Amino acid sequence: MQNVLFQTDKPTATPGYVEFYDLTLTQEHRDGQLLSLFQEMHGWWDNETNRVVLDDTAPSPPVAFKTFCEALDTYHRCRMHRANSGFKHSFMWHPISGMPAYYMPVDMPGESSIVKQVELNDTSHGDYALGA
């Protein structure tokens, strides 16, 4: 599971460096145990080179959890913390181009259902619009 959180819904259209947080939840076998790993990386998308620049001043090694539920809870709490600080535009890295792709806004608790209805019926989003 991965979320790449930006402060803008158009990170590839913003000039220069665009800050992001990459949240990843994976599982792997270590010493005969299945562990759930959570990792948060900080960096910038460089629109001149179309490459990721990782923040090497704040390395974040993966944190291992014995249960998937514990790791998932940490993942969701971190995601909401970042969304509350403005990083509420979620993407994934495109598997071929490596660019931010597959946009989805982060659901924020307490958002008006009227706002969500307007967004869902906005036909400018093509095939994703329910009202199309």
Image (tube, rainbow, N blue to C red):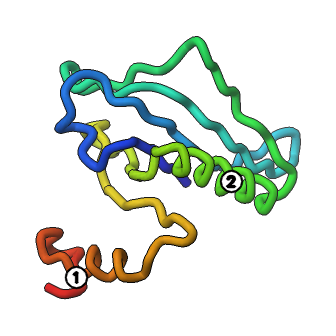
Q: CA distance from mark 2 to mark 1?
A: 29 Å
Residue 116 percent location from the top left of the image: 36, 76
Give the residue number, with chain letter if any, for mark 2. 77
Q: Residue at 55% across / 72% down in the picture?
A: 110
Q: Residue at 24% across / 45% down in the picture?
A: 10
Task: Assign a secondary structure to mark 2.
Answer: helix
Q: Residue at 75% across / 50% down in the picture?
A: 36
- Residue 1 in the image: above or below residue 51: below
Task: Please state which amino acid type lies under the numbered disc 1.
Answer: Asn
The quadrant holding residue 60 is top right
Q: Residue at 32% across / 82% down in the picture?
A: 117
Q: Is residue 76 left or right of residue 111?
A: right
Task: Please state which amino acid type lies under the numbered disc 2.
Answer: Arg
Task: Assign a secondary structure to mark 1.
Answer: loop
Q: Give the mark nearest the N terminus, 2 or 1.
A: 2
Residue 35 percent location from the top left of the image: 79, 48
Give the residue number, with chain letter if any, for mark 1. 121
